[in-house]
Image (cartoon, rainbow, N blue to C red):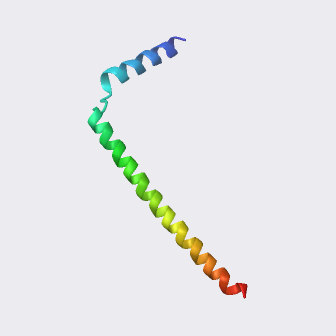
Amino acid sequence: MNKLTAYVRDSYKELVQKVTWPSFEQLTQSTMIVLGATLVITAMVWVMDFASNNALKFIYSLFKG
């Protein structure tokens, strides 16, 4: 039990004294970058899905007869 208490105490001390937390502006900027990247990647996946779907439909229509 002594090791667990020491671990919790040291973890708390590290989080309070040693960790550098981002400012609100840095956090907002990072969030906007992640959201922008997510939208771009989502759009790219949608375009690839749309193109491959239409290409497969075309290929299947060639063999349909």
Q: Among all residues in the image, which is located at the extreme bottom?
A: 65
Q: Residue at x 43, y 52 (%)?
A: 38
Q: Residue at x 49, y 67 (%)?
A: 47
- Is residue 38 shown above or below 49? above
Most foreground residue, 4 or 47: 47
Most foreground residue, 26 or 58: 58
Q: Quadrant of residue 26?
A: top left
Q: Residue at x 30, y 42 (%)?
A: 29
- Is residue 59 shown above or below 47? below
Q: Residue at x 47, y 57 (%)?
A: 42
Q: Position of residue 52 (x, y in %)?
A: 56, 72
Q: Position of residue 4 (x, y in %)?
A: 51, 16
Q: Quadrant of residue 43?
A: bottom left
Most foreground residue, 26 or 5: 26
The number of numbered discs placed on residues in the rendered structure image is 0
Q: Among all residues in the image, which is located at the extreme right?
A: 65
Q: Quadrant of residue 57?
A: bottom right
Q: Position of residue 49 (x, y in %)?
A: 55, 66
Quadrant where the image shows the N terminus? top right
Quadrant where the image shows the C terminus? bottom right
- Is residue 56 shown above or below 45? below
- Is residue 7 shown above or below 20? above
Q: Position of residue 20 (x, y in %)?
A: 30, 30
